[in-house]
Image (tube, coloured by chain):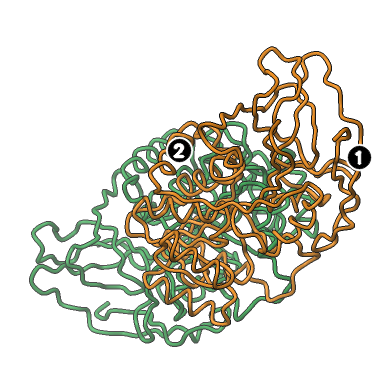
Chain colours: A orange, B green
Amino acid sequence: MSKNQRILLASRPHGAPTPDNFKLDEADIPIPGPGEILLRILYLSLDPYMRGRMDDAASYAAPVPLGGVMEGGTVAQIVTSNHPGYTAGEFVLSHSGWQSYALSDGAGLRKLDPSSAPLPTALGILGMPGFTAYAGLLSIGKPQPGETVVVAAATGPVGATVAQIAKLKGARAVGIAGGPEKCAYLRDELKLDAVVDHRSPTLPADLAAACPNGIDVYFENVSGPVWDAVFPLLNQYARIPVCGLIANYNSTGPAPGPDRLPGLMRKILTKSLTIRGFIQFEFAAQRPDFYRDMTSWISTGAIKYREHITPGLTNAPNALIGLLQGQNFGKLIIHVADPA
Amino acid sequence: MSKNQRILLASRPHGAPTPDNFKLDEADIPIPGPGEILLRILYLSLDPYMRGRMDDAASYAAPVPLGGVMEGGTVAQIVTSNHPGYTAGEFVLSHSGWQSYALSDGAGLRKLDPSSAPLPTALGILGMPGFTAYAGLLSIGKPQPGETVVVAAATGPVGATVAQIAKLKGARAVGIAGGPEKCAYLRDELKLDAVVDHRSPTLPADLAAACPNGIDVYFENVSGPVWDAVFPLLNQYARIPVCGLIANYNSTGPAPGPDRLPGLMRKILTKSLTIRGFIQFEFAAQRPDFYRDMTSWISTGAIKYREHITPGLTNAPNALIGLLQGQNFGKLIIHVADPA
């Protein structure tokens, strides 16, 4: 390939993204200047937060500009380096976005050793999603032995990790996922204590039956009907780390009534609830602990992970559209290229 | 007086309480059995939480039963004692409710020394409201020097204490109250950094002008339109101790739309907000620190307090009805009787 394939944000979505919000573009492969590195992207991570970057709304990070390369975490191999710290052939974790080549000045890169862990894990269980689960559950959720921890999107890379760490901490882990295949995985592979299918027409009753002692920690990454099922079951002093709201990401305009805010505030007061939003950057100081613990848990089989790898950068738009509908099963990664 | 005057819950209110929800009753003065104490009530505290006890809804405490004596904190004097730890004439803090006499077995009593602090302070600045302010602000709000702390119901016994402790901790204290007299008190007596009248038709703009650097801590004890004015101004990592929701206590049935819950959850996520409900019991271990600090702050004039004392137990129903409309100015206390 002699060109740099790039996927640009062509237009901002109104509601769910559509393929025409993206534009495939070919540009010359950039030439590294002094101190710069040319990266060849091998794997691109697709994550729910990317939906937010497509909007022009205030958030914790700036939106992708119209015509700009879609943002994303990547595993790359160094093609050429004018940087004293990096050598051609080395592998790095970078944030190079939806393209096949990128320049870097070294800022924010982390070297990866493919002999210690498979490269795609740097985007999943040993990367941002795994760390999000670890930091959010342990620092905010603080599960205690015997407590009930409920996780939605429980086959996703964050949810599955939260559920397994909760079990390791002695809590009762209840996973919510969509469809029999995902539910079977949670029950049979991850050995969760209870599993609920959010497509069930009796979701609230199913969840209540799965949580006979109520809910002490609800790890929120979906919102929507799952929230309404969780809400009546929250125990005194329950903690709710708010990590994502994927069911709302495509919503447009004000939501119809009734207004659930007064009921939420009343329950926050009467049950002494803690609701705490977070982005994993906040807990960066815990990353060494995370790498140590997670590497150990994976090596002993205490934590399992599942990846959903789709080939071809040009498939990224449809893969993200599907992710927002729950079509992936495991950490969604685009395989952009093989190592040299 | 040879009878025990009692105010009973005659019926549960639908919306705002009315005088006919209460019933004045006369019973014989109870006779203490072995190990028991007869208390004569001197002061009765009226507090917003009492509205919740009149409902039959789940909360952190059981409702007052129909026909039962209305609940409340009291300062009492011991008339006769069959308890080895208590002597006639002593003063105690008790939770004896809306009546002129009560029995106690000593559980939950705290002796009061009227020479160290005026007796009514045990129901206000040195009692439950003062401790609620202290524990909620310091343990959940955690104001840092230079941060902006916004307090609603800022002339109330909790709000005024929160605002002054915030100032002591080096934060910028912004008080919200209703009407020019209360606002002048906050500005001129308590010397808050900024004051906003919640009756102003331009409340959101007024609050924004009073908080040029946004809001880092919002001590929530009112909800309603004040919440909507606060919400857009919340900073990254803002903390919201939820202590009370007085504007909602009289609400009936579901609130009309639009549904503000999705917008709240989105902001919790994008701003990494902490919303934490609490009842002061949770922080009981901090009471010795509270007594030490608050006594010192009062003695040096660093913290001021204001009491609104109304004579006569029979006036308690109308006083509580007025409290829920913001008619009190300072800690509302019923003067039931003089000491013997």
| B79 with respect to A207 (left or right) | left
In front: A233, or B61? A233
Q: Residue at x 72, y 74 (%)?
A: B257
Asked whether the viewer can see residue A216, the reply is: no
Q: How crowded is the residue under tag 2: few (<14 C-alpha within 10 Å), some, or many (20+)?
A: some
Q: SS class of the residue under badge 1?
A: strand
Q: Position of residue B75 (x, y in %)?
A: 32, 61
The amino acid at mark 1 is: Glu
In front: A237, or A284? A284
Q: Position of residue B209 (x, y in %)?
A: 77, 44
* B54 lies above or below A301: below
Which of the two discs, 2 and 1, sits closer to the camera?
A: 1
Specify the label residue A26 is tagged with: 1
Q: Position of residue A236 (x, y in %)?
A: 41, 63
* A49 lies above or below A191: above
Badge 2 and badge 1 in a common chain: yes
Q: Residue at x 68, y 18 (%)?
A: A87
| B70 with respect to A72 (left or right) | left
Q: Residue at x 82, y 49 (%)?
A: A314
Q: Position of residue B163 (x, y in %)?
A: 56, 44
Q: How crowded is the residue under tag 1: few (<14 C-alpha within 10 Å), some, or many (20+)?
A: some
Specify the label residue A295 is tagged with: 2
The amino acid at mark 2 is: Thr
* A100 lies above or below A261: above
In front: A53, or B81? A53
